[in-house]
Amino acid sequence: MDSQLQIIPVEINGRKLESPIFVSGPCSAETEEQVLETGRKISEMGIPIYRAGIWKPRTRPGNFEGLGAVALPWLAKLKEETGLLIATEVANPYHIKEAINYGVDILWIGARTTTNPFMVQELADYLRGLDIAVFVKNPINPDIDLWIGALERMNKAGLKKLVAIHRGFSFYGPSLYRNKPQWGIPIELKRRFPDLPIIVDPSHICGRRDLLREVCQKAVDLNFDGLFIESHINPERALSDKEQQVVPEELKKILASLVWRKPDITDRELKHDIELLRDKIDRLDDELLHVFEARMKVVERIAEFKKVNDVTILQADRWSEILNERKDIGNKLGLSEEFVMSVFKAIHLESINKQTRIMNREIAEKSDFTKYSSGK
Ligand code: PEP
Ligand code: MN
């Protein structure tokens, strides 16, 4: 389903947020001193927005779940003293009411809330008619439609100062990251909604300090619109997410070390050089598509053969053999295993679909089930 989002740049009290948008502050507001001291350092660094969680969505009960509304006056005090814009997470109308009462400038929807359309709708209905910026984190599961859905619900309620936050996705199994970045998803979001600013939250992607710089650089190189990073004056003693928070001095070092590259090529000669390379890419892609076409023609012949001779579509041994051989060849050619596997898995799936259509043509035509594709 195609949709349009009506996005306007975030402007708060006459201050327009230009890309790159920087946001930093602790995972949770813990004490007045921690809120103020962290905030003063963030402000000195020229970062315009301070984040702090007041209500914390913890996976299991018994962990620190945030101090609640008692911490809001500290944020108001910080804002008054430094002029920082204040952002906090809200998950129900009560949170919104309290946050707005204390002058919070930006509300963010957490990853666990974005997964739930009932909750997002409840927030959107409560916010209807208000002129406030809303930052929407991706849902914990890698479902771009759910992310877009949450943005659309806000938009339909009249909220146009929207920013998406990419914080990675849950997965089951070992990984370097706390939440896998799956960069293809925010890249696709950018492709579909070029006006929507997307900022990256490396803290929740990494789950550990030592990877932060690398992920920040990647976000910058992919031309995303900013960074949302957790910082704390004393991370070791943080009540939530202590492994991933950095002291403001460390944050300053990370930001200073980032290499900012040009998003566009304006120089004519350079433009010419890259165009030559892009022409090559276009030609190679064309060749690839023709090779895919030729391969699918062979798949059709195999399907006819299997149909006549009553052979199953899948022979697991042959499929393992294909994967292993292609992986080895790819390896020798310097192609990563992950890439080769995903390309061949996609090819194989298409091949199975094609064979299914050919071998079960009569059933397909009789019951016409092919019409009922996913009705999202
Ligand atoms: C947070 O930003 O502290 C937070 C809880 O993030 P997420 O919703 O991305 O898990
Ligand atoms: Mn956190």
Image (cartoon, rainbow, N blue to C red):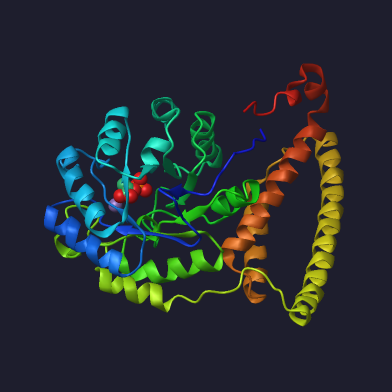
In the displayed structure, would residue 178 be above or below residue 309? below
Residue at the limit of the structure toward the front, as seen here: 14
Measured from the top left, where is residue 1 in percent x and y?
A: 66, 33
Measured from the top left, where is residue 150 in percent x and y?
A: 49, 35
In the displayed structure, would residue 139 be above or below residue 47? above
Residue at the limit of the structure toward the bottom, as seen here: 269
User: 240 or 101, which is in the foreground?
Assistant: 101
Kindly tell me whether residue 295 is visible in this rendering: yes
Kindly tell me whether residue 63 is visible in this rendering: no
Left or right, residue 287 beside residue 374: right
Measured from the top left, where is residue 116 in percent x and y?
A: 42, 31
Left or right, residue 190 beside residue 68: right
Residue 303: image quadrant is: top right
User: 73 or 210, which is in the foreground?
Assistant: 73
User: 158 or 226, which is in the foreground?
Assistant: 158
Residue drawn at the location 63% of the way across and 75% of the way down: 334
Residue drawn at the location 32% of the way across and 30% of the way down: 92
